[in-house]
Structures are given as C-alpha cells and as structure tokens.
Image: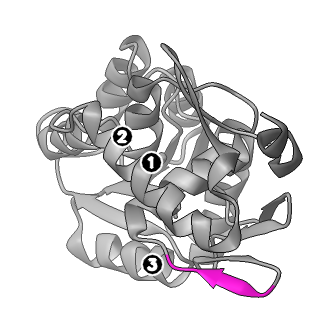
C-alpha cells in the first residue's frame, strides 16, 4: 500500500482528496502547512507527495526545492496541485522539482491517474499489481499472500517486507536499506527490528514451505531468491 502525503491548507479539498485516495487503496497523511509537511516527511518518508503551492509560511514551491536539494528526499515523487494556472507558474513548479503539475479545479479521477503514472515511473514496486515468485503470490490490492491455494497470514509490517522482497528479487538488501524502504525511513526504528520481522515472516512462510526463500547474506543483509535455488543452498 503506497503512502501519500497530501499538503493542502484548505480542509475541504484535503478531505476530498483523502477520501478518494483511501477509496483507491492508498494510505493517506494530511498536512496543512509546510512545517507540518516537513515534520511528516522527517517522520516517515512517503511514496509520493501531493503539494499545494500556496501554504501558510513557506510556499510549496520552496518546499519542493528544499526536498530536491536534500539527499534523503531528492527522489521523492511530487505532484503540485494548485490554483496557479499560468504557464510561467507551471514552468516554475516543474523547474522546482515537481514530477507533475495539476491545476484547480481538478478531477479526482485525473489526480488518481497522475499519481499512478508518477509512481509507475518513480516507484514501480509501490503499485498494486500481483507479484508471483516460485508459486508464492502476493496481491497488494486484497492484501493476500498464498501458495497453491493455501493462504499465508501476515501482519502489516511482514506484508510490506515480503512485498518489497518480491518486487526486488535476488538483490541483497542491508538492514538500513530495508528500514528506509519498508518502514519509510522511520528515525526511531533500530536495525535489529528488521531481524525480528524477518524471523516472523519466515515463520509465516514455513506453513507453505517458502521460508527458505528469504536468505541471510552474512555481513550484508537479506535477499529473496527463487525456491528452487533456496532448496539447493
């Protein structure tokens, strides 16, 4: 489930966007000012930001520039959603680092389509498409994991962890990388927490004989491999 941060100071518009995004399966956080938006980004890195230009205090344009200049947020997908509709405004927004620019009044269906398009380009693993490896299927839309008809019960964190592994197979990921991508770069989570959740994930996958797909790479981290390769190891 993709995390979307909506930065909008008009509560009615923010609520309209929030309702439609949640109905489409996204996890939504709202911020009504630049300071609050920065706090939310510092707390948990979202998958995408819907950003208004005119905000209390610092403008959305300045905030976009700030995020693009920081290492942690330079790749953060941003869609500017604003009443400023002049061509010069659109150029300024895109030059500031926005990946897309949508003007008010807007269609919620168009906003959803643009969000999905930006996520496809910037973070394809965040989309809700079915993933299958070695007979193990994960459906982000229904949040179901199964193999040969047997369902695997997972907690929310284990589900996100498995989703990340399955969309990045055969790659070795360090604990810090997993914290950044699965937990959203949450500054209060310790690296050993990863080990706890990997253990829980393996225990759940053991019920469908897939626990060995999650490999420990000594001194490096973890990776997900094809079941046949895991059985031969």
Evaluate if marks 2 and 1 touch, with contact meaning CB atoms under 8 Å apart: yes
Structure colour scheme: one colour
Magenta stretch: dominant secondary structure: strand
Residue 179, position in %: x, y? Answer: 37, 35
What is the CA distance from the residue labelled 2 to the residue labelled 1? 6 Å
Numbered circle sitting on residue 194: 2
> What's drawn in magenta, residue-wise?
149-153
Label 3 SS: helix
CA separation, marks 3 and 2? 28 Å
Q: Quadrant of residue 143?
A: bottom right
User: The C terminus lies in which quarter of the figure?
Assistant: top right
Determine whether the residue tagged by mark 2 lies in a helix, strand or loop: helix
Determine whether the residue tagged by mark 1 lies in a helix, strand or loop: helix
Using a 10 Å C-alpha cutoff, classify the residue at mark 2 as few (fewer than 14 neighbours), some (14 to 19) or many (20 or more).
many
Residue 118 in view here: no
User: Which badge, 3 or 2, comes first in the chain's sequence?
Assistant: 3
Front of the two marks 3 and 2 = 2
Q: Which residue is mark 3?
A: 22
Residue 188 image point, x, y percent? 15, 37
Q: Read off the residue under disc 1.
A: 198
């Amino acid at each position: 489930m993709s995390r979307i941060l909506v930065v909008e100071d008009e509560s009615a518009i923010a609520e309209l966007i929030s309702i439609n995004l949640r109905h489409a399966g996204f996890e939504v956080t709202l911020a009504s000012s630049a300071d609050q938006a920065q706090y939310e980004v510092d707390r948990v890195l979202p998958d995408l930001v819907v950003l208004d230009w005119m905000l209390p205090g610092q403008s959305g344009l300045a905030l976009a520039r700030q995020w693009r200049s920081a290492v942690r947020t330079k790749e953060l997908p941003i869609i500017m959603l604003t009443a400023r509709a002049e061509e010069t405004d659109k150029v300024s927004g895109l030059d500031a680092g926005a990946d897309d620019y949508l003007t008010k009044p807007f269609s919620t269906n168009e906003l959803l389509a643009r969000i999905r398009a930006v996520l496809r380009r910037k973070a394809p693993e965040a989309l809700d498409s079915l993933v299958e490896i070695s007979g193990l299927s994960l459906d982000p839309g229904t949040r179901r994991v199964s193999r040969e008809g047997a369902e695997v019960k997972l907690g929310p964190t284990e589900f996100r962890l498995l989703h990340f592994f399955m969309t990045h197979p055969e790659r070795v990921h360090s604990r810090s990388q997993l914290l950044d991508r699965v937990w959203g770069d949450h500054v209060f989570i310790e690296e050993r927490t990863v080990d706890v959740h990997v253990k829980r994930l393996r225990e759940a996958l053991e019920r469908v004989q897939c626990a060995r797909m999650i490999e420990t790479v000594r001194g490096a981290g973890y990776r997900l491999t094809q079941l046949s390769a895991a059985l031969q190891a």
